[in-house]
Image (cartoon, grey):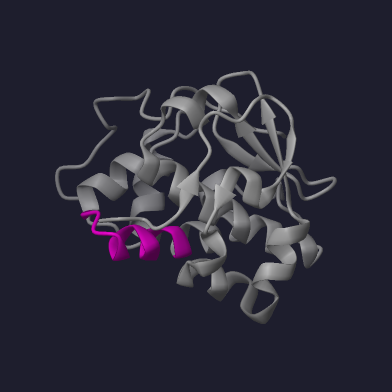
Amino acid sequence: MQLNVRINRDAEVLTYDFKEVFEGFEKVEAVRRIFGDKTEEILSKTKVVLFPRKGYLAVDDENGYILVSKPYLKTADERYIYLDVIHELVHVRQFLEGKNLFDERYSYVDRPTEVEAYRLTVEEARRIGMNDKQIAEYLYVEWITQEEYQRLLHTLGVNMDGVSKPSDTRRRGGWFQTK
């Protein structure tokens, strides 16, 4: 399925306005659900910081900037980047609402901010045609245990039949957590 966005994979390690790296997301219905009528205003104020280390995407809990691994941006499956951007935009909204993005009272897979972001991401993954096996592979991250991974799949309603740890554990090329 055509994603109808443009991802600037050649962006250098700098700070950018959101639309300089991720163009067209203001038209994505899932993003409009996150911000409503303020979508364009918030995206125009959102900054993206590329960093040179291996990793994924994250939101800086001090300023709400989206942190993006340059190696990941360059090499990851376009669907994964697309879904990660939507996931992180949920965190941008949560940051703007004053929520604690890294509430350590919860494990990563049980943290309310993560569950909310992953729920929307899974809905969007299904909308773009990904099946449960593909979604399960997308959801695997290296810093959670097998039990946490299974719990996350269950929480999100992703069919777990025959799914354990994906065979390609480097599906995103490394990991990054700010906290």
Q: Residue 28, how many percent across, how many down?
A: 47, 66
Locate residue 145: give its quadrant.
Answer: top left
The residue positioned 64% from the left and 19% from the top of the image is 52
Q: Residue 23, how many percent across, how many down?
A: 55, 52
Locate residue 138: give its quadrant.
Answer: top left
The residue positioned 77% from the left and 50% from the top of the image is 64
Specify start and end residues of the magenta stretch as a single range: 120-131
Quadrant containing the C terminus is top right
The total of numbered circles placed on residues is: 0
Farthest residue, direction bottom = 37
Describe residue 155's horizontal placement relative to residue 22 as left or right: left
Q: Nearer the viewer, residue 23 or 171?
A: 23
Q: Nearer the viewer, residue 154 or 76?
A: 76
Q: Residue 147, how many percent across, how many down?
A: 38, 40
The residue positioned 34% from the left and 52% from the top of the image is 153
Describe residue 60's horizontal placement relative to residue 81 as left or right: right
Q: Is residue 110 visible?
A: no
Q: Is residue 103 visible?
A: yes
Residue 81 magenta-highlighted = no
Above or below: residue 47 compared with residue 171:
below
Quadrant containing the N terminus is bottom left
The residue positioned 60% from the left and 51% from the top of the image is 88
Farthest residue, direction left = 162
Q: Nearer the viewer, residue 47 or 113?
A: 47
Describe residue 57's horizontal placement relative to residue 45 as left or right: left
Above or below: residue 137 compared with residue 170:
below
Q: Residue 51, how many percent across, how many down?
A: 68, 25
Q: Characterize the magenta stretch by its predominant secondary structure.
A: helix
Q: Nearer the viewer, residue 79 or 22?
A: 22
Residue 125 magenta-highlighted = yes
